[in-house]
Amino acid sequence: MSEVRYVDLAAAEPDEAVVVIDVLRAFTVEPWLYARGVSRILALQERDDAIRLRDHHLTDALLAGEQGGRPFPGFDLGNSPTEVAEHPDLSGATVLHRTSAGTQGLVRTLGSGAVFAASFVTAGATASVLRELAPSRVTFVITGASLGRDGDEDLAAAELIAARFLGEDPDTAPFVSRVPTSDAGRVFAPDGPDWAPPSDLVHCSEVDRFDHALVATPATGLPEGTTAVEVRVA
């Protein structure tokens, strides 16, 4: 039987197979971006990297991301699945995505045998691809366990994906119930900040909303010295 382990963002590093989890909200946003017609997503570690890449190379790209949950001023999109789902047209766009947790995990695990960007919305598809690969070890990166947060929403998604990968078929309700009660989830209350709409909790709690996994690989064709991860539909 395959070994499964869980690490926080600080301990993220390459491994045989890595699943980087960010339920709230990066890896709920990215499947929605593809659902709205985006053609390419590049994940980056720093805001300035995204701006530089847009300004000097991918001049038609859209900038998306946040710091501490808050959208970056001047970016085209924040990090809200509600915003993306309701966007009038993203067809054919390239999106440069930088977030405080999810995209950090992808960059830190470059060099792995296989890397996936996952959340509840792609849980079943991610587990299915893992079963096909049959790695001897899978490391789940709980990106929400950073910046003083408990990351329980990400751990819940990781535990569900791991159970399915190992051949189990658990009730999803106990896992999803941990999203609104996590440190991050409690921010998305009716009286919360405007960048954290309660509708995002709904989007982030939809198990198997999408039938494809997201695989992450080193981006190619970029200027020398640019570190970016291409996230694409598996």
Image (tube, grey):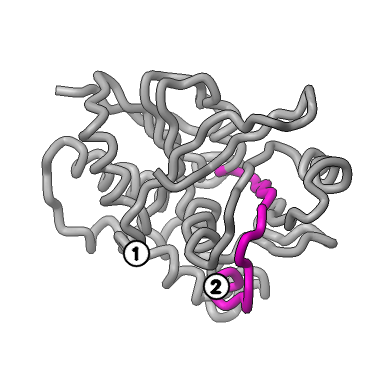
Badge 2 crowding class, 10 Å Cα cut-off, few under 14, some 14 to 19, many 20 or more, is many
- 95, above or below 194, in the image: above
Q: Between 179 and 43, which is closer to the camera in this rendering?
A: 43
Q: Of the numbered discs in the image, which one, if any, rests on residue 209? A: 1
Q: Is residue 41 highlighted in magenta?
A: no
Q: In which quarter of the image is residue 229?
A: top right
Label 1: state its secondary structure.
loop
Label 2: state its secondary structure.
helix
Q: Quadrant of residue 44?
A: top right
First to last magenta residue range: 82-102
Q: Identify which residue is drawn at 82% across, 41% down.
A: 57
Q: In which quadrant will I find the C terminus?
A: top left
The location of residue 20, given as percent across then percent down, is: 45, 38
The location of residue 138, given as percent across then percent down, is: 32, 27
Q: Of the numbered discs in the image, which one, if any, rests on residue 82? A: 2
Mark 2 and 1 residues: CB-CB less than 8 Å, in contact?
no
Badge 1 crowding class, 10 Å Cα cut-off, few under 14, some 14 to 19, many 20 or more, is some
